[in-house]
Image (cartoon, rainbow, N blue to C red):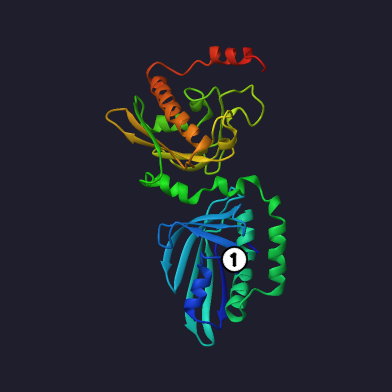
Amino acid sequence: MAEEKKAIFRVVIDGSQEAIFRELTRTDGLNGAIFNSRMVTTGLKPGGRLQMRTASGEHTIVDGDIVEYDPPRRFVHTHRFTQFDDPVCRVTYELKPVAGGIEVTLIVDDIPLGTKTGKEMRRGGDFILRNLKAIVESGRPPFGTRLMYAVFGAMEFVLPKRTRTVHWPLFLLLAIALGASAEERTIVKEVVVKATPETTYRTWTTSEGITSFFAPEAVVDARPDGAFHLHFNPYAAPGLKGADDMRFLALQPPRFLSFTWNAPPHLPEARKQRTFVAVRLAPEGEGQTRVTLRHTGWGDGGEWDKTYQYFDRAWGHVLDNLRKRFETGPVDWTEFLKGLRAAPGR
């Protein structure tokens, strides 16, 4: 039978419409209907960001946006599994009174054909509604589901590294998008470069572009959760080359990109953490672009303060190199690399 891009699941539940809707959208605990996930949002409203995380919160399984929120009748959000490179689909819950209770309809639209996402979404609908019915009518999921959830917790360590919540920062990403609150300290740097936004964007989102102004070596995969690995010392041991294992968070060519960031190797405690950088590009006169960089997500005291001071200086140098790249040409790293090779203890 040929695959369809839509799947529809239904169940009738003996309970109040408000209680059912509240269980589907709860953010105050684990959602026993939806794989014992922890729903985290920037606000239950259209345009809000939504994630479904493991019970521990250490891994993010689903990332999406809220499209409609009409309690207690309708809830719609986009849905992307963080462990797959598949397109997003859309999930709709519709609730209405019928004889015998409340009919809940789960609709999955835009299922990407021939994908792991498609397989998971087609087999997950009945599971969700069966658990939802049990929870509302009896107060807890079926025994078999509870055993499965126990196994989920014990086996969380096998989840792919890319699903770690540190790579899917919800609230700090929101702070970046809003320019950060007055309480959140943020490094802000600007420069005007002699290049169009399209050219400037490519310079930030390709390996060739990055090595022309930022670092002598780079691995760049410009997509959400794609690699943004910048090696300031290519000869160092793995993990100590510079911005090792950083990731893109969001991209909107040719206007916006954001990525995770870490502290330099000489600040090892802060280096274990992640902060976040957003770069906005805006046309500035004929053939020019204003580049605005914001770096936020800082802790307080100790190496946090030292890291903040370090990057408050460093980002100015980076943007100056970007300006020079379009005025006098790409950075020539030859002498810099010679110096690294000759450094004692290398």
x and y percentages locating residue 200 in the rendered image: 41, 30
Quarter of the image for residue 138 reads bottom right
* Residue 18 at least partly seen: yes
Residue pictured at 52% horizontal, 79% vertical: 103
**In the picture, which quadrant includes the C terminus?**
top right
Quarter of the rendering containing residue 152: bottom right
Residue tagged 1: 34
Please name the residue shown 57% across and 78% down the image.
136
Mark 1 element type: loop
* Residue in the foreground of this view, choosing between 35 and 329: 35
Q: Quadrant of the N terminus?
A: bottom right
Q: The residue under label 1 is which amino acid type?
A: Ile
Left or right: where does residue 187 sit relative to residue 137? left
On screen, residue 225 versus residue 150, left or right, reads left
Q: Position of residue 294 (x, y in %)?
A: 41, 37
Point 59% across, 77% down: residue: 133
